[in-house]
Amino acid sequence: MAETTRDTQTPESGDSSPRTPAALRPSAQPPTLAEPLRVGAPASVAGGVTAVVKAMQHAWDEMGVMRGAQTLLKVNQAHGFDCPGCAWPDPAHRSAFEFCENGAKAVAEEATTARVTPDFFQKWSLVDLAAQTDHWLGKQGRLTHPMVLREGASHYEPVSWDEAFALVASELHALGAPDEAAFYTSGRTSNEAAFLYQLLVRRFGTNNLPDCSNMCHESSGTALTETVGIGKGTVTLEDFEKARLIVVIGQNPGTNHPRMLTALEAAKRQGCRIVSINPLPEAGLQRFKHPQAVRGVLGGGTPLSDAFLQVRINGDVALLQGLGKALLEREARAPGTVVARDFVESETLGFEAWAAHLAGVSWDDVVEQSGIPRERLETVAGWMAETDQIIWCWAMGLTQHKNAVGNIQEVVNLTLLRGAIGKPGAGLCPVRGHSNVQGDRTMGINERPRPAFLKSLGAEFGFTPPEHHGLDVVATIEAMRAERVKVFFALGGNFLSATPDTEATAEALRRTRLTVHVSTKLNRAHLVTGRRALILPCLGRTERDTQASGPQFVTVENSMGVVHTSRGTLPPASEHLLSEPALVARLARAVLGPKDTVPWEELAADYGRVRERIARVIPGFEDFNRRVLEPGGFSLPNGPREGRFTTTSGKAHFTVHPMPRWELEPGQLLMMTIRTHDQYNTTVYGLDDRYRGIKAGRRVVMLNAEDMKELGVTAGQPVDLTSHFEGERRVARKFVVVPYDIPRRCAATYFPEANVLVPLHSIADKSRTPTSKSVVITLVPSVDLPALEASR
Ligand SMILES: Nc1nc2c(c(=O)[nH]1)N[C@H]1C(S)=C(S)[C@@H](COP(=O)(O)OP(=O)(O)OC[C@H]3O[C@@H](n4cnc5c(=O)[nH]c(N)nc54)[C@H](O)[C@@H]3O)O[C@H]1N2
Ligand SMILES: Nc1nc2c(c(=O)[nH]1)N[C@H]1C(S)=C(S)[C@@H](COP(=O)(O)OP(=O)(O)OC[C@H]3O[C@@H](n4cnc5c(=O)[nH]c(N)nc54)[C@H](O)[C@@H]3O)O[C@H]1N2
Ligand SMILES: [Mo]
């Protein structure tokens, strides 16, 4: 097959839209600036006083001293708002400071006093805005007015809410079929807004509900549904107090779930062992200084990991099979000591096939593919054999590979072998990202809804919801490229920069008739538009929400299936903002017409009425309005947690997976795209990755020093990266080389700058999640392209 190359930074290449000459088009990527990069030693301890100082700095810079302090004191309190940071649960006994450095940044980002007004949009054209960095775009502040980009216009202009809704309605009505529209959701949307949104979309007539889960924990949901019968984790926060062994695999909690370190520290102090499995020695997994405890202010902090297995990127199946093999060999030496026989016999299927498969796996392959010596695996297997109070935690390091579902199912295999599920201190813990991503799925944001859900929804609202499956994220991009989807609507998020293959996604969005974003802050997705575009500004979590019946609260579901309230306390950023539930209800009326039988206005006037409907449609929400007001909220039913596997067979399933093999050609590396300590997904808070010692720059590529020698590149040198997939090549220019403690032939870059390199069609088996942590690249020293730079 002939190779095709897309130089993603050469404006005239690629399949350019016939409508606008490339030079006049807003750029889909941030500019490549010369960053004053500073590289120091990585930190070996997370938290401590610096974390508090950094949190306060961000809060004060964005909000001022008083508003900053008052706002942070409301985070994650029983009568306050849910932190818009991560989905880690709140402890039953909360301290006054139930937030972390990065939660404080997330709050500050939303509660900033800076504003993006109509004057701002009059001054800045789309092309000029797109020439700014993502960091700059975010710093401009909160959106204050609904804005429209009219056909052919270079600037957004203010528009009334009624006109905005009428525009969406007229474009939707002009479609040949409801499936020509797609409705994206990001995971910050409340349960109430998400429920109304999916109802609107299904009454309109489609299941095209792609969401950020498709790029996130979809692999976990798929893997767990097949094997244990529920697409969620099985542990509660209390289990962390009882566990004897906690494994953190493919996750960087020090940065992405800092409050989890408090739970790990507490477990550790009670004698629990912690094992971390990661290509990088992440600071938060080595040592932790609790910023709100005296021992975290004085002294060196608590060492966390008892063992650190520095696995090669995507070497986890090999590593987990090695652990399984070591455990089965122990069992053979001392029968009855390792395999939880009674549990395996009465509650599971497939053990024999799995054991037979591992017997055929060679230790040489395990060691070669994982990069971990056999003795180290034997040690950890020994710890696993000592206890059945084992918790496995994971995040994107397992979910974003071709064999992601296999990764997670290998974790399930080890869990079932030990019977380490459905008992105190044991179970499976996929650590969610966005603060309500799990709740959104529970509310029916799902392009492949379960028939029982549709039946129940249809019965409650008297209609027949569409049954055929809708489009996920990657399929939506493809459909827009092929002009099969012509209207793109997003409830939150940054579809352009979060998705793989940035230039392909940009081209897809440009081919639509209308792009609409419901947002709190300006981002690059507002700049790469369809023929027409809307920005619809909404209230954030931190803000008071008052509707016709009075003050409202919303509800969210955390990573452990606990549903609780979230109540904003700050005055809204602008009087023109709508809450997400109100916005969806008004849109629904505009789209579905005055005769639609759903009482949209009544539902928006009192969210308690939305919760009444949810209670009737979704199992586990019975008596929702009363139970959610109990302290701490309530837990949703969870079969495996209660010892019932809700698979079709009623049993948990062992599964067999081939060991994936590295197939790199000479000079090729396997690259993962990860988050810095100073970002929330595509929102860039600052330019430092403090724990990794990388400051004042984001366009970096971390490499093993030996590989650097072999490739003939030096620290600080700018290189161009090329990704390779099925004969396609994608190029990203000027990433600065940083030597780092990373396994041979592995590389790391930051999301979203490196998303241009993630091939659109490189997706996980079954879950279809883009393989953002398994990108095959080569690199060459950058050559300056003065002519090209000048032409932009
Ligand atoms: N402050 C902050 N908090 C966040 C976010 C944020 O951007 N900023 N994002 C939120 C969201 S939506 C999510 S999903 C989570 C993400 O939370 P994480 O999954 O922790 O985020 P990543 O930075 O993608 O890091 C993945 C980790 O996996 C490791 N890894 C990569 N490849 C492999 C592999 O092949 N095997 C193993 N074992 N490890 C690997 C990386 O070295 C890194 O430590 O965080 C949430 N919380
Ligand atoms: N290469 C690579 N790509 C990745 C990943 C990776 O690890 N590597 N991770 C993937 C993952 S795990 C995820 S979850 C996705 C994230 O994908 P998204 O969820 O689409 O992206 P975010 O950057 O979280 O969205 C940020 C925007 O959301 C808006 N926003 C913030 N709060 C609110 C709110 O309360 N309401 C509304 N309506 N809007 C709000 C703001 O305008 C802000 O600019 O990215 C994925 N992409
Ligand atoms: Mo995520």
Image: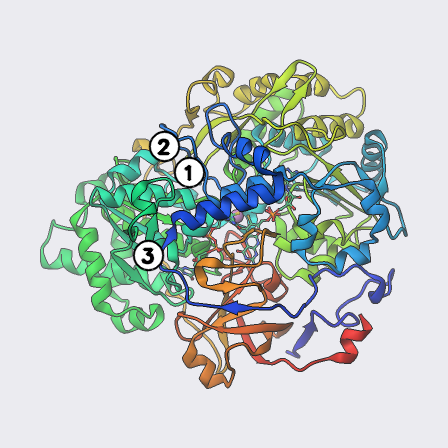
Question: Residue 286, which numbered label?
Answer: 3
Instruction: Find numbered disc 2 in the image and state the secondary structure of the residue it sits on.
Output: loop
Above or below, 753 against 405 in this view is below
What crowding class fits label 1: few (fewer than 14 Cα within 10 Å), some (14-19), or many (20 or more)? many
Q: Position of residue 212 (x, y in %)?
A: 58, 46
Name the residue located 51 percent from the left edge and 17 percent from the top edge: 625
Q: Nearer the observer, disc 2 or disc 3?
A: 3
Q: Position of residue 717 (x, y in %)?
A: 56, 79
Q: Position of residue 790 (x, y in %)?
A: 80, 74
**Three-letter code for the amino acid on which mark 3 is drawn:** Gln
Give 293 or 623, whichever is nearer the viewer. Answer: 293
Give 659 or 690, whichever is nearer the viewer. Answer: 690
Furthest residue in direction left, as rendered: 334
Instruction: Find numbered disc 3 in the image and state the secondary structure of the residue it sits on.
Output: helix
Give how far apart the Cα atoms at labels 1 and 2 are.
7 Å
> Which of disc 2 and disc 1 is earlier in sequence?
1
Q: Nearer the observer, disc 1 or disc 3?
A: 3
Could one spot residue 187 in this view of the protein? Answer: no
Q: Position of residue 308 (x, y in %)?
A: 30, 60
Furthest residue in direction right, as rendered: 152
Question: Residue 564, which numbered label?
Answer: none
Relative to 19, 62 lies left or right? left
**Three-letter code for the amino acid on which mark 1 is drawn:** Ile
- Dots 1 and 2: beta carbons under 8 Å? yes
Check disc 2 and report the residue beneath it: 639
